[in-house]
Amino acid sequence: MKPMAHTPGGAWYPTIFPEKCDGCASLEKPRCVEFCPNGVFTIMNGKAVVAYPHKCVNGCTACEPIATKKAIAFPRRLTTFAQIREEDKGLLRKAICEKCGKTYRTNREVNICMDCESKK
């Protein structure tokens, strides 16, 4: 099973591979459950599950390396932040971030830069 592909504007959250997750059997709780400050994970049938995907911070992958058996994966960043080709720049509009004031180019309707959006 591969992690879901991320599309701009789509949901961002981890995939847990149940065949790899042992619920951190040697510990009281799975490490990801203890680690995530946003409460994305919970325990079900002795394994970690993504119970609250909407709580995951866009672009955050901090829990991925703490999964001892590589049981957590995220969408590939290459599809999240695609390179802008010169011929596509006409499709983008210039915007000013409402939070930090930075000028950037976007094809989205939101006037918040990716840096500020990931700090939610």
Image (cartoon, rainbow, N blue to C red):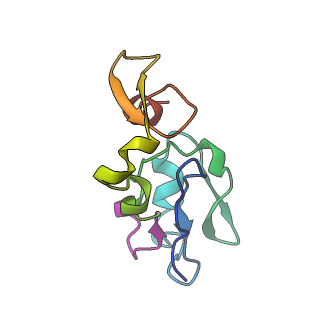
Q: Quadrant of residue 55?
A: top right
Above-or-below relation of 109 to 103: below
- In this view of the protein, which residue sits in the foreground, 71 or 9? 9
- In this view of the protein, which residue sits in the foreground, 67 or 108? 108
Residue drawn at 48 percent across, 56 percent down:
32
Q: Is residue 84 visible?
A: no
Residue 76 point in image, percent of width and height: 41, 65
Residue 106 point in image, percent of width and height: 44, 37
- In this view of the protein, which residue sits in the foreground, 45 or 101? 101
- In this view of the protein, which residue sits in the foreground, 1 or 70? 1
Magenta stretch: helix, strand or loop mostly: loop
Residue 71 point in image, percent of width and height: 47, 73
Residue drawn at 38 percent across, 51 percent down:
88
Above-or-below relation of 20 to 75: below
Q: Quadrant of residue 95?
A: top left
Q: Is residue 29 visible?
A: yes
Q: Is residue 45 left or right of residue 35?
A: right
On whether residue 30 falls in the magenta region, the answer is no
Number of numbered discs on residues: 0
Residue drawn at 36 percent across, 62 percent down:
78
The region drawn magenta spans 65-74
Residue drawn at 36 percent across, 15 percent down:
101
Q: Is residue 107 left or right of residue 94?
A: right
In the picture as drawn, the residue positioned furthest to the left comes out as: 86
Q: The N terminus appears in which quarter of the rendering?
A: bottom right
Residue 22 point in image, percent of width and height: 53, 77
Above-or-below relation of 53 to 105: below
Q: Is residue 43 left or right of residue 96?
A: right
